Image: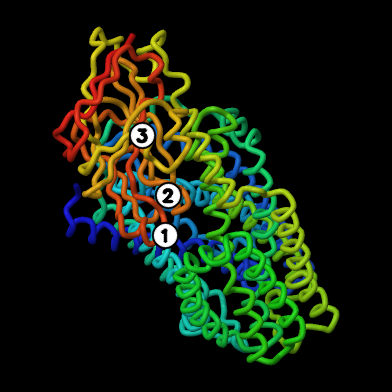
Amino acid sequence: MENSKGNIVSRLSYSFGAFGNDLLFGLLSTYFIMFVTTHLFNSGNKAQDAKMIGFITLIIFFLRFVELAIDPFIGNAIDNTHTRWGKFKPWVVVGGVLGPAALVILFTDFGGLTKSNPMLYLILFAILYIAMDILYSFKDIAFWSMIPALSFDSREREKTATFARIGSNIGGGTIGIVVMPLVLLFSLNANQGTGDSRGWFWFALIIGCAAALSAVVVGLGTKEVESDLRKNKEATTFKGVFRVLMHNDQLMWLSLAYGLYAIGMSLTNSFELYYFTFILGDASKFSILALINTIVGLAAISIFPALAKKWNRRNVFLVAIALMLIGLMVFSLANSSLILVLVAAELFFIPQPLIFLVALMTITDSVEYGQLKLGHRDESLTLSVRPLLDKLAGAISNLVVGITAVAASMTAGATAATITNHGRFIFKFVMLGVPAVSILVGALVFFKKVKLDEKMHASIVDELERTWAKDFDSDDESESTGSQPSSKAELSYYAPVAGEVIPLEQVSDAVFSTGSMGRGFAIKPSDGRVYAPFDGIIEATFSTRHTVGLVSENKIATLIHIGIGTVKMKGNGFITYFEPGQRVSQGELLIEFWSPAIKKAGLDDTVIAVITNSDNLSEFEIENKGEVTKNDVVLTLEKK
């Protein structure tokens, strides 16, 4: 087990890394395009400036699509990295330092090339941009892949992820709070509150340095757990990625729904600073909105578990989408009223963390759906879909923002007073109308096609529990264990948990009591720790953490199931200390669970142990029927 002090340092370091990661993401995805459209090109020739903005937005759009296509190869390169510092941290530090440096340079005109040699500028821009984007992707993928590498303890992983989400939310809010104060502070010419190129460069430099510092802190403050389990056994091919994704229909429908939502959400969020600058006429007030968003975002994250439990995820999604659409309607009526703008922006923003979590939880559940449908588990590939969709939405958003800024004349030298009614109409239509349609269509796809809710996921896990060991038979002993067939047919099965042994027939779940899952026994637990009953390999794991499957060297397969109906708890109250494929020894701690939490949920905490391939046994003898500990043999088993 990890040292508590070390855990705290690791969590804080990782949280600061998430803070810096979102600072950099905001700089790249939201504020860079603002700089490009309003300050980078200021030659005095509006037609030439508009043409250059068009070229830049098209280059960004095209290069981001290219980068999306190579993301799987970036992930594979990270998986195959082996250094004394681990596989993730080198990429976090290298990408996290060089990526921001490249982005800061992009906040310049390359020494006046935008005017003196526009074509050379475009070529150099494209080269530097794709290099920056690839460096950012290496850092981003490595950073969010680190959580499983920091601990085998599922509770510690949850704490680390929670700290990271808090840091991420604060980072995303902070950059919005400081953007205009920093730009105006360093600008030589305020330009009626829009600042100048010098101010935007210093803003980018400060944010870039903070992001780079956070990457270094992650490198110094975290430690990857050394384990053979994390060594990549087989490279993931590009074809393999899409084969997995395309055969999981629930994941695909969810991806379409979330992708449409993300495009609409990203568009409106990207235009908000434009609204404050060119509609309200006071960009400095944008800091008020960003501050409120930071506070509200933290509150929304904290109430999600209670809302999901009370309403279920689909209802949370429905209410969240309704609030966003109401927010867009209020925005359309707000005009130059700061109060109405803030109300509209909050109605639009409050649901965003909730929808993100609904999508993330549903994508996580689709891992088991794909496992049941395809016969193998593809956790990393499945979970990679969400960030890919966010990047895709960002690429489309940047293109649309650039085109709209030119069409609405919100370019260099423009102010709120210079924007015509026609320009305002174009701007509001793209900022509010297009996102409303995109979000609404995404919601319709979600409710029509995405059937994977909590109830369906629970039934999928139940089915997986029943079928996971069906392929283990006496004819292929070396395949799952990775060892030569054992000549030892007899196996002593130790108690997996302390408590009172009871016959399987007394269990209140017919699936187990009738023996359809295999022969076995149950224990009324007096302790909340589950141990390995014999030496073997972890062959079955589930995101709900309430059950685990092991296989011995001579291919005896057992399923240890904590409680009855506990799949509904979605992992709350359970901590796991293993990874899929891990070799464990008898008596090694596998799971901790909290019985009061199970009983509070109105469920039975009985621990059930069954031999799922008990038809292959010639001997099945219960040795102990009273109180037992992990040191007591409960069963003696012998293969046919």
- Front one among 274 and 148: 148
The percent coordinates of residue 534 (x first, y second) are 23, 27
Q: In this view, which residue lies farthest toward the right? A: 422
Q: How many marks on residues?
A: 3
Q: Amino acid at mark 3?
A: Leu
Q: Residue at x 59, y 53 (%)?
A: 391
Q: Amino acid at mark 2?
A: Thr
Is tag 1's residue or tag 2's residue first in the polypeptide sequence?
A: 2
The percent coordinates of residue 467 (x first, y second) are 49, 28
Q: Residue at x 19, y 56 (%)?
A: 6
* Residue 566 disc label: 2
Image quarter in which the C terminus is found? top left
- Residue 203 visible from this viewpoint: no
State how far apart marks 1 and 3 are (Cα).
Answer: 23 Å
What colour-coding does the image apply?
A: rainbow
The percent coordinates of residue 441 (x first, y second) are 76, 59
Determine which residue is flagged by label 1.
601
State how far apart marks 3 and 2 are (Cα).
Answer: 18 Å
Determine which residue is flagged by label 3.
504
**Contact? badges 1 and 2 (CB < 8 Å):** yes
Q: Amino acid at mark 1?
A: Ala
Asked if residue 1 is positioned above or below residue 555 in the image, the reply reads: below
- Residue 469 visible from this viewpoint: yes
Left or right for 612, reference 276: left
State how far apart marks 1 and 2 are (Cα).
Answer: 9 Å
SS at badge 1: loop
| Pointer 1 local density, CA inside 10 Å: few below 14, some 14–19, many at least 20 | few
Q: In this view, which residue lies farthest toward the left? A: 631
Q: Residue at x 61, y 48 (%)?
A: 452
SS at badge 2: helix
Q: Quadrant of residue 341?
A: bottom right
The percent coordinates of residue 135 (x first, y second) are 46, 48
